[in-house]
């Protein structure tokens, strides 16, 4: 096995920013807004780096698809311990319509090219909440998948994954190569230390175009409109159960 | 443990993102957490005057530590009147933030001063003044002279652990009878064999109740006042060192400030930093860095206060309109923002010149003078727009009002800055 792990990292609007919808309802305001690495991608990077520190894998490659600024996100991964990066350049209209299907095609192509043993992604991105890229990538590669992972252990050429599911925890064993997606409790990402930030400057980031990987970026989806969620109305307190029933009847709920 | 940690992060992630419109003040504090310092400086390094992508990566990494390890606890530490210096310094030390411009051989990163400025700027996102001040004392007031002039042995014992965050340092310069007039300090270190015996006391000692060692300025001979002082690395656990009291202050509550007495304290002569008699000179040398550091710190905080005031006045209605819509309010905030930008420009200009090897004493003093005064003006104006809420302890602006008042006093009072500037302008009375 190559001992190489591909980690996908996505540049998203920072979790602490208050999102504003553009006046023309075509999307959300991104200009001048603070961006950072998707928190679940951070967890994915941390897991990959941990595996390398345990000497279970040999190389961690961080991948990001997007415009020039995506390189900053890759640098953060490098500062956390990834060995090198791949920036898949996607800009303009293509970037606006970039979705899980296109990214999965890119990741699948790269996984084959790099002969990856594992592809680790965050379970979902906090901007679109799709929770699809990991699953689609596995399907395109015809690889097994361990999604919503809260615990990962490598045993020879198999991976034991404890998954967080609705009913509790499910433990599965899958063979490599495989795709894993990280859930919140998988680990606590390390802080990028200043020495590592400076070392990351010397690590390589390769530049690749989707066309080089034979990937067609056309989207089958069209965003019609983006609206803010409805304003949450204030609640009402009532004295007795009878009052409650009366109010519910008035509101046409009962 | 992981579950609790995970659920706390989950809460942070989802609570802050989906904040409902606030019509009650309960929401104000959460809003404050939501304010990202919308700096008018470009987000990327392409056009920045002094910062490279590494500076921005540094700020982002430090911001994470602040958001997770410091800000959630600030209110508690302000109430306690102290913050856990050893714990926080260790976290920062592990991540490399305490030795940014210190030599690599002693755990530092050997980077230039622009990186220290970036750290100082980012620390302005801490929701109080006390903790950045305590960190600044550790990184840029107690250790520069030691790093430059101390012996190998001394650096191993005091500098290395301070950079790693294992030892907390404090500065012993000011005394009850001598603040601005440093040359008139009375603490004496009398030579007896290969020891100094120290008697006297120090005042306004930040980190004083938690420190492992003190960078002490004392009179070591009877010569002229600018040439008879030495800097000594003093372990705080030596017999005779008496941390008398924690001073109760108007602001900077989370920073413990002590009054310390020395009663026949014996310290080996080898603990003197560099040459005997050069202490005053050594301490003066790093004033430029200290002052620019303080300015970098306050610029970020001031900007955060303006942003929070905008957010508050946008939703608070008065006479049927948001407070912000009244011209006197948004015009005044524009004036203040303009002044903040001017100060920032001066900061970057001085920093750029300094890292090229120039003496920026005049510019640094000007920046410190302006910083202290602008912080007072800004906190006063902004607090006014918060109305009654501004007067409560629930909001950041009232804490800033109290904390920022110190800037015109400590680390070189306004009047001292004015004196320095006049010296450069050659307008002081001639002898």
Image (spheres, coloured by chain):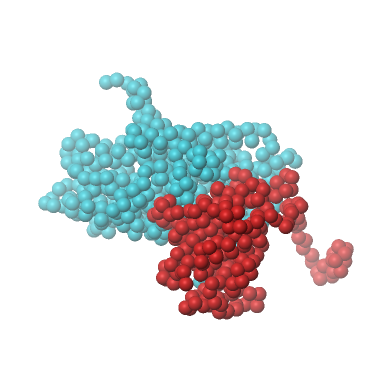
Chain colours: A red, B cyan
Q: Nearer the viewer, residue B339 or A65?
A: A65
Residue B425 shown left or right of residue A250 in the figure? left
Quadrant occupied by the C terminus of chain B:
top left
The spot of residue B42 in percent (x, y) is: 54, 41
Total numbered labels placed on residues in the image = 0
* Identity of the residue drawn at 55% across and 48% down: A68
Residue A7 shown left or right of residue B141 in the figure? right
* Identity of the residue drawn at 76% across and 60% down: A235
* Image vertical order of residue A167 relative to residue B161, above or below: below
Q: Is residue A234 visible?
A: yes
* Identity of the residue drawn at 79% across and 66% down: A239
Q: Is residue B171 visible?
A: no
Q: Quadrant of residue B82?
A: bottom left
Q: Residue furthest left?
A: B193
The spot of residue B74 in percent (x, y) is: 50, 55
The spot of residue B129 in percent (x, y) is: 47, 47
Q: Nearer the viewer, residue B309 or B252?
A: B309
Q: Quadrant of residue A170?
A: bottom right
Residue B191 shown left or right of residue A105 in the figure? left
The spot of residue B262 in percent (x, y) is: 25, 51
* Identity of the residue drawn at 36% across and 33% down: B360
* Image vertical order of residue A174 relative to residue B43, above or below: below
* Image vertical order of residue B282 relative to residue A20, above or below: above
């Amino acid at each position: 096995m190559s001992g190489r792990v591909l980690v996908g990292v996505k540049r998203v609007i920072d979790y602490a920013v208050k999102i504003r919808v553009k006046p023309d309802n075509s999307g959300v305001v991104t200009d001048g807004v603070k961006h950072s690495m998707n928190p679940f991608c951070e967890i994915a990077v941390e897991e990959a780096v941990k595996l390398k520190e345990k000497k279970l894998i040999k190389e961690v490659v961080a991948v990001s698809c997007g415009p020039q600024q995506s390189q900053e996100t890759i640098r953060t991964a490098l500062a956390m311990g990834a060995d090198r990066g791949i920036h898949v350049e996607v800009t303009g209209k293509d970037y606006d319509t970039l979705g899980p299907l296109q990214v999965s095609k890119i990741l699948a192509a790269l996984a084959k090219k790099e002969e990856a043993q594992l592809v680790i992604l965050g379970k979902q991105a906090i901007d679109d909440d799709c929770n699809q890229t990991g699953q689609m990538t596995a399907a395109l590669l015809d690889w097994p998948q361990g999604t919503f992972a809260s615990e990962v252990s490598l045993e020879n050429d198999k991976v034991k994954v404890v998954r967080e599911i609705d009913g509790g925890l499910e433990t599965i064993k899958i063979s490599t190569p495989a795709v894993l997606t990280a859930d919140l409790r998988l680990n606590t990402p390390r802080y990028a230390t200043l020495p590592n930030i400076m070392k990351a400057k010397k690590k390589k980031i390769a530049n690749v175009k989707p066309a080089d990987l034979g990937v067609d970026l056309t989207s089958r989806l069209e965003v019609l409109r983006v609206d803010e969620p409805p304003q949450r109305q204030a609640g009402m307190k009532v004295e007795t159960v009878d009052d409650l029933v009366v109010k519910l009847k008035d509101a046409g709920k009962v | 443990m992981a579950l609790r940690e995970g659920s706390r992060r989950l809460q942070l992630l989802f609570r802050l993102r989906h904040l409902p419109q606030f019509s009650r003040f309960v929401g104000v504090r959460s809003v404050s957490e939501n304010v990202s310092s919308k700096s008018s400086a470009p987000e990327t390094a392409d056009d920045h005057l002094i910062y490279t992508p590494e500076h921005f990566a540094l700020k982002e990494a430090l911001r994470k530590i602040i958001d997770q390890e410091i800000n959630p606890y600030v209110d508690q530490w302000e109430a306690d009147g102290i913050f856990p210096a050893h714990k926080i310094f260790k976290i920062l030390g592990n991540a490399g933030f305490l030795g940014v411009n210190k030599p690599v051989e002693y755990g530092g990163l050997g980077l230039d001063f622009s990186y220290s400025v970036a750290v100082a700027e980012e620390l302005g996102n801490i929701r109080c003044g006390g903790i950045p001040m305590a960190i600044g004392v550790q990184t840029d007031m107690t250790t520069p002279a030691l790093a430059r002039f101390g012996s190998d042995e001394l650096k191993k014992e005091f500098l290395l652990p301070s950079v790693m965050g294992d030892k907390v340092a404090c500065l012993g310069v000011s005394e009850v009878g001598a603040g601005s007039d440093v040359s008139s300090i009375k603490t004496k270190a009398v030579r007896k064999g290969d020891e100094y015996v120290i008697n006297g006391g120090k005042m306004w000692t930040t980190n004083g109740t938690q420190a492992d060692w003190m960078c002490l300025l004392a009179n070591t001979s009877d010569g002229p006042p600018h040439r008879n002082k030495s800097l000594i690395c003093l372990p705080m656990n030596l017999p005779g060192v008496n941390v008398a009291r924690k001073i109760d202050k108007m602001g900077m509550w989370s920073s413990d400030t002590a009054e310390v007495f020395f009663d026949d304290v014996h310290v080996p002569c080898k603990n003197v930093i560099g040459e005997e008699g050069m202490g005053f000179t050594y301490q003066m040398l790093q004033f430029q860095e200290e002052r620019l550091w303080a300015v970098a710190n306050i610029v970020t905080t001031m900007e955060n206060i303006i942003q929070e005031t905008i957010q508050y006045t946008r939703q608070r209605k008065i006479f049927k309109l948001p407070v912000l819509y009244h011209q006197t309010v948004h015009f005044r905030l524009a004036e203040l923002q303009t002044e903040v930008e001017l100060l920032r420009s001066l900061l970057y200009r001085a920093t750029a010149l300094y890292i090229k090897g120039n003496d920026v004493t005049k510019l640094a003093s000007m920046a410190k003078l302006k910083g202290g005064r602008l912080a007072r003006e800004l906190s006063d104006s902004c607090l006014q727009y918060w109305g009654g809420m501004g007067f409560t302890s629930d909001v950041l602006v009232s804490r800033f009002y109290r904390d920022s008042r110190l800037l015109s006093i400590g680390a070189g009072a306004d009047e001292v800055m004015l004196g320095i500037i006049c010296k450069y302008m050659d307008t002081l009375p001639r002898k």
